[in-house]
Image (cartoon, rainbow, N blue to C red):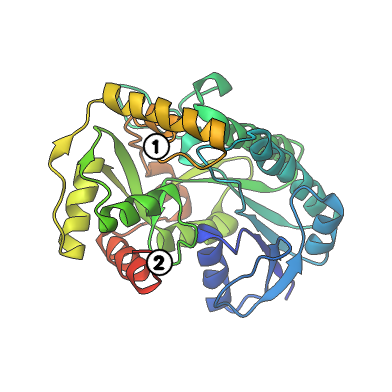
Amino acid sequence: MKPTLVTGATGFIGWHVARKLLARGCTVRALARPGSQVRELDLEVVTGDLRDPDSLERAANGCGSVFHVAADYRLWAKDPGELYRSNVDGTRNLLTAARNRGVERVVYTSTVGCIGIPKDRLGSEDVAVSLNDMTGAYKRSKFQAEQVALEFARSGFPVVIVNPTAPIGDHDFRPTPTGKIVVDYLKGAMPAFVDTGLNLVDVQDTAEGHLLASERGRPGERYILGSENLTLQQILARLAQVSGGHAPRWRIPHAIAYAAGLASTGWANLTGQEPRVPLDAVKMARTKVFVSLDKAKRELGFHPQPVDGALRRAVDWFRANGYV
């Protein structure tokens, strides 16, 4: 059996994708940057970098399929060019290497941030969207990377695209912005909330959706991998239930949140330290990212579970691993 290459296995979604593949008996090869490690999983690790084409050629050699999950996922960076070099150029480098090495199938992990969200209905894969609709360097770089993946698919290379929503669960090492909501809540650092909404999904279901996309997805198509459309207030209420805490009751007006984001990000640009309130995150919060899962359910057989169990696992994992 040819090995399966997973990029991003040192991170959140990629780690769970690799674990799912191992559980199915697959031989898994993980790409990791120098100094990084894949924790708790018994697999082959190949040192490389998305910005180093030669290392990607070595990593893809002999592989039958690739899950390209790795991304520079930050809502602020002192040098935004880093996000484009990893997310856009890195995706082109990896897909080129995969094609050169005869890989038979690639699943590219995009983001729900590249899905259009109309005002009058749920967002879906068929909503027209452009680069001008993207807020901030992260979403713009991921949109451009998705266009690279579509370009390869149009040329005949079998690339399937998945658009995860906001995953939650255990082994969120960094943590991601979604996991940071949980950590901040547990620390008591979230006394109030803004009027926004996310589609939350168990990261284990996200990983399962990746495998389904590899097996059943159509090349050149995009599939939203999500579960429940929830306001931030509802998410915090569920966190209170699973953690034994109290849900905040005060809602912060967007104007005040914007001012805080402006000040926090301005200070970060001066000092180089990550902002407590990234301005791009505040701008994104003006839109409730509520989406439809119909296409993934219909074409992939994707049927995610409610997110309460994932929230509980996230709370337990963050507590057990010293994040709070």
Q: In the figure, residue 258 lies in which quadrant?
A: top left
Judge depth for marks 1 and 2 and give the one in front.
1
Out of 117 and 44, give the one closest to the viewer.
Answer: 44
Residue shown at 39%/54% (left/top)? 179
Q: Quadrant of the C terminus?
A: bottom left
Work out whether 308 lies above or below 41: above
Query: In the figure, 117 relative to 186: above or below?
Result: above
Direction from residue 7 to residue 245 in the image, left or right: left
Mark 1 to mark 2 CA distance (whole Å) = 24 Å
Identify the amino acid type marked 2: Asp
**Does residue 313 appear to the left or right of 130 in the view shown?**
left
Instruction: Judge whether 142 appears above or below 238 on screen.
Output: above
Which residue was labeled with disc 2?
170
Residue drawn where x is 42% and y is 45% of the image: 165
Give me the residue at 67% from left, 36% from top.
Answer: 84
Instruction: Say which amino acid is labelled 1.
Output: Val
Disc marking residue 277: 1
* Element at label 2: loop
Q: Which mark is residue 176?
A: none
* Quarter assignment of residue 261: top left
Give the x, y percent position of residue 47: 76, 65
- The quadrant in which the N terminus is found is bottom right
- Place of residue 37 in the rendered image (x, y in percent of width and height, measured from the top left): 64, 69
The front one of 244 and 95 is 244
Tell whether label 2 touches label 1 (CB within 8 Å): no
- Residue 212 visible in the shown view: no
SS assignment at label 1: loop
Looking at the image, residue 9 lies above or below residue 145: below
- Where is residue 30 drawn, in percent x and y? 68, 67
Q: Is residue 285 left or right of residue 15?
A: left
